[in-house]
Image (cartoon, rainbow, N blue to C red):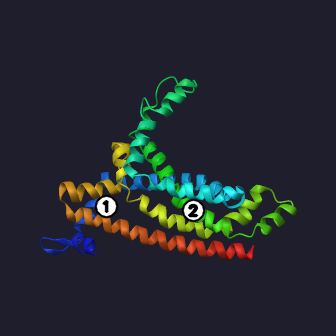
């Protein structure tokens, strides 16, 4: 609550000027919009990676399930800074990705937008947070009786139908847990945007860090922090509600 107190404290007492400064400044509004866009695209990319991964771990790998799950968990134990700097080497102008694309003839010159851009931030965030999305989804899918899936196939349902009508509704709790665990913290990311995003990948977490630690403007920094906290609460409540509704629909279906 100290951030709330500092965000409404002025020289003459109570004030909302700090919030007004944020909402009136086009730069802050652009950064807020960019933060939402980056977090949303990264979250969608993580779901696209994690839903198939969770399904494979839960139903397709047999005895390799535990070793692969352990490898997924251990992949997150690497120091975050080492991971980010590794991505800088991969995505750089002379990095592995550009070199491979040049060698294959896909491009005729290096793609500069792969690093120090919003694209770079999305790529690094998407891969870095996958364990936190895949494991809850895996846990939800693991709780599904395989006989239910087999019965659906026996009745002629294709994989797309099974995924849409059975897997996703029953795995909804894991999906929405991942939204709370990952989507909300993405809004506060500052290390990844600072190291691979450049000016075009600047996010609200970087602004909060700059306002408090560099500029010393605790009022605006605290107001941004409280707005972020408020947004987190709203997203958590919406995720919980959607999870319950999805579960009810799955039972009715």
Which residue lies at the image location 72% right of the left edge and 76% below the top edge?
Answer: 251
Which residue lies at the image location 36% right of the left edge and 65% below the top edge?
Answer: 228
Secondary-structure class at tag 1 = helix
The residue to which callout 1 is attached is: 23
Q: Is residue 56 visible?
A: no
> From the viewer's perspective, is residue 46 above or below residue 90?
below
Image location of residue 189, percent across then percent down: 38, 56
Residue 209 position by quadrant:
bottom left
> From the viewer's perspective, is residue 247 above or below residue 198?
below
Closer-to-camera residue (12/103): 103
> From the viewer's perspective, is residue 77 above or below residue 195?
below
Secondary-structure class at tag 2 = helix
Query: Hey, which residue is sitting farthest right in the picture?
Result: 155
> From the viewer's perspective, is residue 129 above or below residue 227?
above
Image location of residue 22, percent across then percent down: 29, 60
Q: Quadrant of the C terminus?
A: bottom right
């Amino acid at each position: 609550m100290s951030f709330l107190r500092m965000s409404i404290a002025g020289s003459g007492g109570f004030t909302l000027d700090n919030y007004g400064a944020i909402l009136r400044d086009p730069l802050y509004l652009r950064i807020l919009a960019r933060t939402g866009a980056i977090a949303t695209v990264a979250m969608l990319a993580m779901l696209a990676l994690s839903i198939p991964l969770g399904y494979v771990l839960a139903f397709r790998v047999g005895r390799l399930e535990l070793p692969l799950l352990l490898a997924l968990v251990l992949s997150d134990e690497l120091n975050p800074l080492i991971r980010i700097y590794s991505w800088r080497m991969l995505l750089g102008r002379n990095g592995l990705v550009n070199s491979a694309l040049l060698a294959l003839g896909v491009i005729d010159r290096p793609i500069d937008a792969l690093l120090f851009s919003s694209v770079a931030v999305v790529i690094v965030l998407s891969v870095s947070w996958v364990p936190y999305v895949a494991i809850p989804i895996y846990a939800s899918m693991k709780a599904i009786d395989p006989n239910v899936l087999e019965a659906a196939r026996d009745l002629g349902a294709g994989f797309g139908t099974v995924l849409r009508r059975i897997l996703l509704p029953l795995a909804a709790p894991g999906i929405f847990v991942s939204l709370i665990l990952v989507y909300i913290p993405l809004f506060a990311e500052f290390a990844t945007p600072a190291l691979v995003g450049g000016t075009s990948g600047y996010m609200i977490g970087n602004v909060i860090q700059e306002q408090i630690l560099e500029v010393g403007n605790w009022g605006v920094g605290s107001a941004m922090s409280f707005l972020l906290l408020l947004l987190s609460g709203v997203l958590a409540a919406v995720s919980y509600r959607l999870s319950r509704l999805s579960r009810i629909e799955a039972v009715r279906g």
